[in-house]
Amino acid sequence: MDRQANQVEYAALNRLLKQRLAEDHANFVRNRLLDATNSKRSLKVEERALAEHRLSIPCLKAPDGSRCTP
């Protein structure tokens, strides 16, 4: 998609991408904490491990582990 050709559509897609990324990251964190709780691991340790994921997200992955972005 050409960014300069249709700025309104580009902005809408960018907003949707950021929203979905935030939802996906929230689900990832929730699932990791639930797994830690169910397997009786320390939540503090798990939260520290999740803090590393908060800094940068190198690529998007599907639930099966395949990469969605280059």
Image: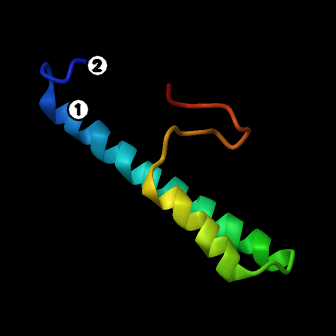
- Specify the amino acid type for callout 1: Tyr
Q: Which residue is mark 1?
A: 10
Residue 64 picture location, percent across and down: 73, 38
Q: Is residue 53 shown left or right of residue 31? A: left
Residue 26 picture location, percent across and down: 53, 63
Dot 1 and dot 2 residues touching (CB under 8 Å): yes
Element type where label 2 sits in the image: loop
Q: Which residue is mark 2?
A: 1
Q: Is residue 51 shown left or right of residue 65? A: left
Residue visible at 51% across and 38% down?
Answer: 59
Residue 42 picture location, percent across and down: 75, 81
Depicted 53 relative to depicted 46: above or below: above
Q: Is residue 8 shown left or right of residue 44? A: left
- Specify the amino acid type for callout 2: Met
How far apart marks 1 and 2 lie (CA) works out to 8 Å
Q: Quadrant of residue 40?
A: bottom right
Residue visible at 81% across and 78% down?
Answer: 41
Q: Decide: few, some or many residues near mark 2? Use Cα within 10 Å; few <14, some 14-19, many ≥20.
A: few
**Comes first in the chain, label 1 or label 2:** 2
Of the pair 50 and 33, the residue shown nearer to us: 50
Element type where label 1 sits in the image: helix
Residue visible at 61% across and 31% down?
Answer: 67
